[in-house]
């Protein structure tokens, strides 16, 4: 089986069996990563360009390492080192990068739909590394991989996503993926960040932490972006933490084998208490490791589409 | 030059004409209109023709003959944004679309907030324009919403209305003063209704689709709050208010109620607000990015009802041409606007096919009512009036191809649509465009 598109633009665009293929392939790469020599020659001679128009540490380094593990030549462009600061349009920038011979372009951009826009203008496989408030598909894939690894399944699980869902591309991609696999998705947070209308997506919305966490198998905690505070979405981080912060006490509401996830970077003591983040239920660092395997799988499978 | 339009189906609501007949034009004026009604005698027709020997004869058999259309809401972009459109290209696009008069919004560079810019537009339109151009002056200096612009001087120079279109006048006090002050000149104040605090960052209609595309939404309420406010101010001041580009069900309802209560308010909508929903944005189609944003089916239904029952007086285009490069951008950064002059009449004729409007009502919305609101001596085929006429083939089908637009703005969400009904010939003050 192959993926149907040369691009990974979002989870919305992927079929369920394509997601399963990516997760299964990632499993193989995870074994590779456990070896002493972690590099494979799979994509030697091909070139990946990481175009990051927004700051990123985790996703960029994860992609870069995944690319290097597959023996790709890697070029990193960030907004400040590119011609974007000289006023060049996005399409011109990517066409120029394409002319250099890129096979993959990983793009992170503050504007939703930017990967979709460039995909229509270049030959290279476009991988969405996070676009605006739309999607962050590789994060959802690595989260699904982690959940499957820990619980053995996705179907029928009760999964709570807590925080600023409205502005979270991580949450959006996770919602689309988990629904495709028949999980029960609950969104928890203040009504300004988790409007009731979101139930139209096929999820349940809770504004109360204790009832939302009742018997859940997985808790995904999202980063609260500090800049939201001044915009009136909630009065203060202190008040946010008091109502929607994940504490060890609240964690007792969840199922006893529940796992705690966070896409990082964390605000300790705000959305998640330190003892929870570092506690036995936390799989936060495993998510990071799995991210590498999942991104290798994505690159590898997208290369296969063109062959 | 004499022109005889023969045997057309004349629709002129200003004279209650709906029948087969001829129109005779000489020296840019209408000098005869006759043989009306299917049963009229041949004698009449012959006598009309004999008044002027050797006219240019246009056979309009099977075609409609309307008074030239008037578009109250157009962005001609000149001065300042000639790369998007000029007075010349914009007016040529207008006549292709059947319009003989267009009103130019003031958000040019410099803004039309003083009489020298007004004068420039009028002179340029006389030199290069294909049709009549009426400038609309800014309500406030620089369209900043703070201080009133010199409405009186601009009015005497030729501005027919005032609007800060593109920017709402956020201060209720300033809007109150504008509505009060404009009464001195009996000109309408045209309001772009948008509460900028509420719509902040919105690039499409708020709702499930915006959520799934990851685009920030502007709620209907951002428009409706301002419609409501401006109606309250019109009531307070007894000023002449015209609501631009109505896009929501709630706005239609509020305007209907206001009219019932006798408040002086008129309203317009645009073809895109009754033709397509927010679904056109799917795939991050920047040609469907427009402000106010495309809404939902229930809004379309309400707008059609509003057109039918007279709540909405006018169909205008909000023709907003942009350069290709500006639209080929990230959705968030692409400018809002649709190039509308060359598809407006065809899209509006669909309303006739659907039974929403009669042909007469359509002509009222696109010619008679704009003339009334602007108090312009236009929109009629009365003897003695300027020869502004459009001949329309209601059955002719064509495919929308933006590359063939005369307008510099190729930004249309209707690319590839097959539309029925189009103007085949437009006469502006006796000049023929075909």
Image: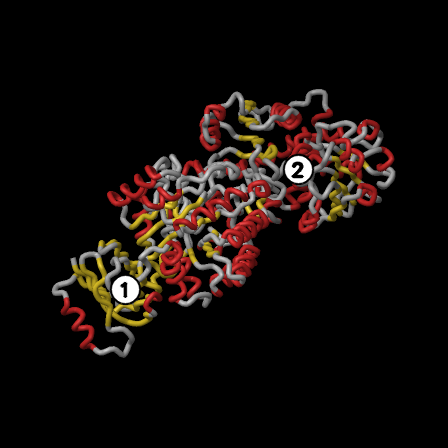
Could you say where residue B284 lies in the image, as x and y percent from the top left?
A: 52, 43
**Near-viewer residue (B207 or A137):** B207
Q: Quadrant of residue B197?
A: top right
Q: Quadrant of the C terminus of chain B?
A: bottom left
Residue A140 left/right relative to A239: left
- Above or below B107: residue A55: above
Q: Residue at x 42, y 42 (%)?
A: B138
Q: Which residue is mark 1?
A: B382
Residue A68 left/right relative to B156: right
Answer whether labels 1 and 2 touch (C-beta < 8 Å). no
Could you say where residue B185 lies in the image, as x and y percent from the top left?
A: 39, 49
**Near-viewer residue (B237 or A74):** B237
Q: Residue at x 65, y 38 (%)?
A: A167
- Above or below A201: residue A78: above
Q: Quadrant of the N terminus of chain B?
A: bottom left
Could you say where residue A276 lies in the image, as x and y percent from the top left?
A: 82, 30
Q: Is residue A305 visible?
A: no
Q: Which residue is mark 2?
A: A168
**Near-viewer residue (B236 or B12):** B236
Q: Residues within 10 Å of mark 2 (few under 14, many from 20)?
A: many
Residue B313 left/right relative to A282: left
Badge 1 and badge 2 both on one subunit: no
Could you say where residue B433 lies in the image, as x and y percent from the top left?
A: 25, 53
The chain letter under disc 1 is B
The chain letter under disc 2 is A
Q: Residue furthest left?
A: B53
**Near-viewer residue (A129 or B346):** B346
Residue A143 left/right relative to A256: left
Q: Quadrant of residue A138?
A: top right
**What secondary structure is marked by label 2?**
loop
């Amino acid at each position: 089986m192959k993926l149907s598109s040369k691009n990974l633009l979002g989870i919305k665009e992927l079929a369920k069996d394509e997601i399963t293929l990516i997760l299964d392939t990632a499993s193989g790469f995870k074994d590779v990563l456990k070896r002493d020599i972690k590099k494979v020659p799979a994509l030697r001679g091909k070139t990946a360009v990481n175009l990051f128009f927004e700051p990123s540490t985790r996703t960029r380094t994860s992609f870069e390492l995944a690319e290097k593990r597959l023996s790709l030549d890697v070029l990193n462009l960030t907004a400040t080192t590119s011609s974007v600061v000289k006023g060049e349009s996005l399409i011109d920038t990517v066409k120029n990068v394409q002319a250099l011979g890129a096979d993959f372009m990983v793009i992170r951009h503050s504007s939703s739909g930017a990967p979709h826009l460039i995909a229509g203008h270049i030959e290279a496989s476009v991988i969405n590394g996070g676009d605006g408030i739309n999607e962050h598909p590789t994060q959802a894939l690595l989260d699904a991989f982690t959940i499957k690894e820990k619980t053995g399944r996705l179907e029928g699980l009760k999964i709570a996503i807590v925080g600023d869902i409205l502005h979270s591309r991580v949450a959006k991609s996770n919602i689309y993926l988990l629904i495709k696999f028949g999980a029960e998705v609950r969104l928890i947070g203040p009504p300004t960040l988790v409007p009731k209308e979101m139930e139209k997506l096929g999820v349940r919305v809770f504004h109360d932490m204790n009832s939302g966490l009742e018997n859940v198998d997985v808790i995904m905690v999202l980063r609260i972006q500090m800049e939201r505070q001044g915009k009136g979405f909630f009065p203060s981080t202190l008040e946010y933490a008091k109502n929607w912060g994940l504490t060890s006490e609240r964690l007792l509401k969840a199922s006893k084998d529940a796992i705690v996830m966070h896409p990082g970077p964390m605000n300790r003591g705000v959305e998640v208490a330190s003892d929870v983040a570092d506690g036995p239920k936390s799989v936060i660092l495993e998510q990071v490791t799995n991210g590498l395997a999942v991104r290798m799988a994505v690159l590898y499978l997208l290369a296969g589409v063109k062959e | 030059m004499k022109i005889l339009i023969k045997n057309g189906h004349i629709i002129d609501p200003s004279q209650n004409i709906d029948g087969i007949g001829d129109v005779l034009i000489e020296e840019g004026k209408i000098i005869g209109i006759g043989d009306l009604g299917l049963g009229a005698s041949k004698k009449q027709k012959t006598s009309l023709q004999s008044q002027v020997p050797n006219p240019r004869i246009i056979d309009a058999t099977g075609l409609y003959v309307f008074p030239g259309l008037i578009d109250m809401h157009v962005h001609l972009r000149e001065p300042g944004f000639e790369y998007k459109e000029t007075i010349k290209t914009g007016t040529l696009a207008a006549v292709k679309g059947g319009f003989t008069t267009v009103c130019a919004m003031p958000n040019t560079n410099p803004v039309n907030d003083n009489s020298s810019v007004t004068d420039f537009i009028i002179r340029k339109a006389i030199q290069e324009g294909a049709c009549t151009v009426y400038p609309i002056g800014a309500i406030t200096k620089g369209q900043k919403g703070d201080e009133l612009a010199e409405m009186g001087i601009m009015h005497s120079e030729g501005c027919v209305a005032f609007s800060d279109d593109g920017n709402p006048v956020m201060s209720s006090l300033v809007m109150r003063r504008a509505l009060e002050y404009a009464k001195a000149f009996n000109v309408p104040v045209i309001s772009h209704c948008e509460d900028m605090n509420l719509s902040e960052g919105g690039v499409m209609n708020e709702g499930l689709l915006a959520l799934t595309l990851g685009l920030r939404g502007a709620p209907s309420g951002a428009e409706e709050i301002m419609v409501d406010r401006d109606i309250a101010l019109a009531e307070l001041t007894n000023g002449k208010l015209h609501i631009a580009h109505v896009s929501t069900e709630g706005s239609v309802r509020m305007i209907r109620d206001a009219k019932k209560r006798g408040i002086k308010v008129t309203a317009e909508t645009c073809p895109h607000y009754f033709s397509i929903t927010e679904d056109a944005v799917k795939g991050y189609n920047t040609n469907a990015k427009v402000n106010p944003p495309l809404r939902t089916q229930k809004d379309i239904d309400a707008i059609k009802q509003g057109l039918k029952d007279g709540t909405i007086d006018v169909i205008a285009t909000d023709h907003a041409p942009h350069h290709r490069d500006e639209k080929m951008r990230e959705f968030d950064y692409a400018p809002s606007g649709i190039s509308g002059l060359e598809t407006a009449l065809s899209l509006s004729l669909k309303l006739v096919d659907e039974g929403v409007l009669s042909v007469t009502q359509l002509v009222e919305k696109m010619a008679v009512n704009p003339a009334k609101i602007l108090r312009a001596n236009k929109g009629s085929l009365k003897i003695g009036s300027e020869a502004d006429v459009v001949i329309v083939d209601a059955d002719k089908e064509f495919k929308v191809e933006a590359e063939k637009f005369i307008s510099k703005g190729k930004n249309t969400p209707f690319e590839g649509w097959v539309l029925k009904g189009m103007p085949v010939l437009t006469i502006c003050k006796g000049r023929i465009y075909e």
